[in-house]
Structures are given as C-alpha cells and as structure tokens.
Image (tube, grey):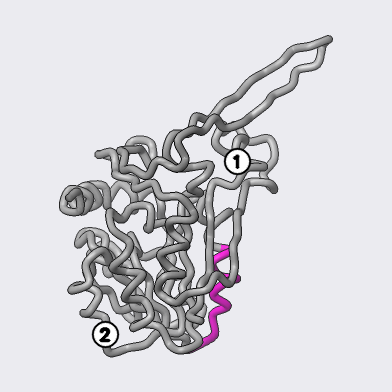
C-alpha cells in the first residue's frame, strides 16, 4: 500500500506546488478551468464539494462565482496553505478520498456538484470515492473530474520532435510514442520541474475508470478532450506535441 507514502510526498511538495500553481498555471487556465466551469454551470448558492483541492485555487474560483464551497485534501499542508489564502466562506477539511471512513465525515450535506481537478490519477484507490459519491450528491447532482489523458499523457509515453530540412524548407513534426496503454500500474513522475520529490501516478485505462462509475449508477453526461490548439509558436515541446493531441480528459457524470 503506497497511500501513506503518496501523502508524505504531497505534503513535501505542497509549498513548491503552491508557488508554481498560484491561481492556476498555463495548463490549468488553458485546458482545465474553462471546461470545468462550463460543465459545472455554477449558479449563486450552489453547494459544491471540491475533492483533492491542493492549494485551493479552483475552490476560490468557484467561491468567487457565488458557490458555497467545501474543499478537501488529504495533505494537511495543502489545507493549511489553502486556508491561509481565504476566503473564510470556503470550508476546508482534511479528508482522504481513498478511505470510506474519511468520506463519511462529509455526510450531512448533499451537494449540487462535486469536482475533482487533476487528482484521480494521483489516488491509489478510486473505488471508495466512486462508491460513496451517490450519498453526497443531490438527486440531479453532477460529478466532474479532470485527469491526465490516460491514452496520451499517462503511462509509457515519449514526446517526440523531428525536424526535416528538405529542398530548403524546414518542417517540424511533433508526436507521441506510446505503449502498454492497457497495463495498469503505478509509477513515479515529475508533475512540475524542480519539485522536491517525484510523485506517484496511478495509470488506469479510460474504460476502467468509467466502468467504476457505471457500476455505481452513473451515466456519462459529457466527455471533453482539450488541447493547446489555440496556442501558436510555442517554445515548449509539451505545448507543441499537445496542440492537436489532448493531454487531459474531463468528464461529467450524473446518477441515472
């Protein structure tokens, strides 16, 4: 079981991630936030639960749009950082979403929406959360999650850049080499260059993830694959590779 080690890594990385993430880095602001906000369709007074809130940047965004937000993370240092940033209207809780006993601490309120931003691939176990979600959602409530795209930005991927100089014309080609997509495993990786410790990723296929939701009474309501299509002349190989290939997957699910 790696869960304690995963938690220790995130507590170690929390301050570094907060400084680099701020109120949303390029990846989040370009790919994740716009889609999640559209799928949430927040109305003033909506009760929203944020699972795996990190430094609280998306919780603050939702609160600024009028939502009543409860935000959770299993890394105590992230919760301390998020609380210090305010606003006081956000209720922050230390909750390990991989443990049913911890999720039960959230009982007593049913939410209009629950969101999990770029965190499911960081969880050793996702079954406890998915099984407990129906107890936390209103009858017409929705669950929205974003993850590194399991097909193109998870597992065994290599980003590639080739340059041809043929007949006086230079052409750049960017692509991904991927293998063993169906081999589900954990591995250490770097989420942000320079972070103190490598973090664990838990690679699962899209079908494995969605099957867990279907088993617990959910239906898929939206399926989004954003890319950097609108960014031109980037100096980053990451942005160029993912210009026409999606590095993230965002889904909205509802109870049948």
- The vertical placement of 198 against 87, above or below, is above
Task: Tell me the tag on residue 60.
Answer: none
Q: x and y percent of residue 126 in the render?
A: 32, 61
Q: x and y percent of residue 181 in the render?
A: 47, 40
Q: Is residue 193 visible?
A: yes
Q: Tell me the mark number nearer the camera, choosing from 1 and 2.
A: 2
Q: Which image quarter: residue 213? A: bottom left
Viewer-closest of 213 and 52 = 213
| x 47%, y 74%: residue | 218
Viewer-closest of 76 and 215 = 215
Q: Secondary structure at mark 2?
A: loop
Image position of 149 (left or right of 126): right
Q: x and y percent of residue 17 in the render?
A: 34, 49
Q: CA distance from mark 1 to mark 2?
A: 40 Å
Q: Secondary structure at mark 1?
A: loop
| x 41%, y 70%: residue | 215
State the extent of the magenta-drawn residues as a range: 34-45
In the rendered image, the residue lying farthest to the top is: 167
| x 55%, y 70%: residue | 220
Q: Which image quarter: residue 231? A: top right
Q: x and y percent of residue 217 in the render?
A: 44, 77
Q: Is there a contact, CB below 8 Å, between mark 1 and mark 2?
A: no
Tell me if mark 2 has few (under 14), some (14-19) or many (20+) residues whose alpha carbon lies within 10 angstroms of its own.
Answer: few
Magenta stretch encompasses residue 40: yes
In the rendered image, the residue lying farthest to the right is: 167
| x 52%, y 44%: residue | 151
Q: Which residue is mark 1?
A: 242
Q: Is residue 26 visible?
A: no
Q: Which residue is mark 2?
A: 107
Image position of 133 (left or right of 37): left
In primary-sequence order, the first of circles 1 and 2 is: 2
């Amino acid at each position: 079981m790696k869960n304690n080690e995963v938690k220790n890594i995130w507590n170690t990385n929390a301050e570094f991630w907060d400084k680099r993430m701020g109120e949303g880095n390029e990846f989040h602001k370009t790919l994740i936030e716009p889609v999640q906000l559209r799928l949430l369709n927040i109305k003033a007074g909506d009760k929203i639960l944020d699972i795996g809130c990190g430094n609280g940047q998306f919780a603050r965004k939702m609160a600024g749009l009028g939502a009543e937000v409860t935000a959770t993370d299993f890394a105590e240092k992230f919760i301390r950082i998020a609380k210090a940033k305010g606003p006081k209207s956000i209720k922050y809780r230390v909750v390990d979403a991989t443990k049913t006993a911890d999720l039960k601490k959230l009982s007593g309120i049913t939410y209009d929406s629950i969101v999990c931003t770029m965190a499911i691939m960081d969880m050793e176990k996702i079954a406890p959360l998915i099984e407990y979600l129906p107890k936390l959602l209103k009858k017409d409530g929705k669950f929205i999650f974003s993850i590194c795209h399991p097909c193109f930005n998870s597992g065994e991927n290599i980003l590639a850049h080739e340059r041809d100089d043929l007949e006086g014309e230079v052409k750049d080609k960017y692509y991904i080499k991927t293998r063993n997509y169906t081999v589900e495993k954990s591995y250490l990786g770097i989420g942000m260059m320079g972070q103190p410790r490598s973090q664990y990723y838990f690679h699962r296929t899209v079908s494995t993830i969605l099957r867990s939701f279907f088993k617990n009474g959910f239906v898929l309501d939206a399926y989004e694959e954003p890319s950097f299509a609108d960014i031109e002349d980037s100096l980053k190989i990451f942005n160029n590779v993912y210009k026409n290939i999606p590095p993230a997957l965002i889904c909205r699910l509802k109870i049948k």
